[in-house]
Image (cartoon, helix red, strand yellow):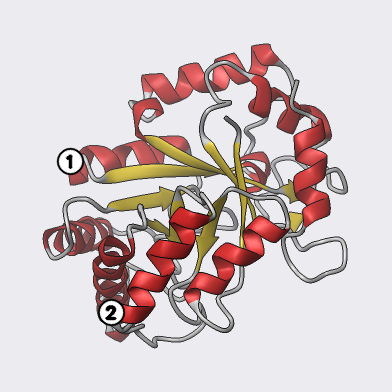
Amino acid sequence: MLKLGAHQSIAGGLDKAIERVVKIGGNCLQIFSSSPRGWSFTKLTDDQINQFIKTAEKLSVFPIYFHASYLINLADDGKIGQLSKQSLINELNLAQKLKIKGSIVHLGSYKNKVESSKYQLLINNIKEILEKTPKETFFIIENAGNRKIGQSLEEISQIFKDVKSPRLRLCLDTCHLFSNGYKFETEKELYKFLEKLEKLNLLDKLEVWHLNDSRDPFNSKKDRHENIGQGTIGLNEFKTLLNHQKTKNYPFIIETPGFGKEGPDKKNLDILKSLVE
């Protein structure tokens, strides 16, 4: 069964996002646990937790993921680094209570230059977060665009090697891949891409895909999302992903601007559904 969903707003309560995704035709979901542009840590009552779980079960929405705050930077050695750790520890503890699979994380950036001490700090911070959070939850690293940590698959592979945890997982975003020189319009290209993932020991870590078209040219190093079919990637890449034997069973989540500029919508999901053979 195709698992296709979207990032949805939590306005009015986390459970409302479940209803919203069903309304646009989705059956899996990504949400923020609180405002992505602040450091507020969500606390929920038992009633709110039960309501969320009940709604997800009733409407058959699964899996559900958190997307971590945009402010996270686990390579920062100051206040931001500390708050990033606290935020993710809080979020993964909440994920377990809500039966959410885990948190999809942009790791941050080294700012001006990569230093071995900053890299070691990044690794230590991820390990600390994993130590202080439930074993059932996943820490899901998303490949990055625009000069952030995790632009290349090789860099991500090294982080997996150095953290050494079965709870580390991978989220691949089509827009970020495209902007960093990876594309797979044909089965042959996708086969080569999956082979590369396998060589880097990342294929068995892959958890979820973000399906987003790109506003920018191939290998531009930018990461601006566009609606499916309106960007520079082309529908063939999405068609290949959705139908290939090795990729079609992953959850696919859109983070598109929406045709009415109101975020991921039914039209984007309908276009993707029309590509499924």
Q: Nearer the viewer, residue 260 or 174?
A: 260
How far is mark 2 from mark 1, CA to CA? 34 Å
Residue 236 visible, this orientation = yes
Circle 2 SS class? helix
Measuring from the top left, give residue 84's x and y in whole percent: 32, 75
* Residue indicated by mark 1: 164
**Residue displayed at 11% across by 60% down:** 131
**Residue displayed at 50% across by 77% down:** 36
**Residue displayed at 48% across by 16% down:** 195
Residue 159 visible, this orientation = no
Image marks 2 and 1: residues in contact by CB distance under 8 Å: no
Label 1 amino acid? Lys
Q: Quadrant of residue 100?
A: bottom left
Measuring from the top left, give residue 169's x and y in whole percent: 34, 43
Q: Quadrant of residue 273?
A: top right
* Residue indicated by mark 2: 46
Vertical position of residue 200 compared to residue 31: above or below: above
Identity of the residue furthest to the top in this view: 188
Vertical position of residue 159 compared to residue 59: above or below: above
Q: Residues within 10 Å of mark 2 (few under 14, many from 20)?
A: few
Nearest to the eye among marks 2 and 1: give it: 2
Circle 1 SS class? loop
In this image, 212 relative to 157: left or right?
right
Measuring from the top left, give residue 51's x and y in whole percent: 41, 72
Label 2 amino acid? Asp
Q: Quadrant of the C terminus?
A: top right
Which dot marks residue 32? none
Measuring from the top left, give residue 259's x and y in whole percent: 87, 61
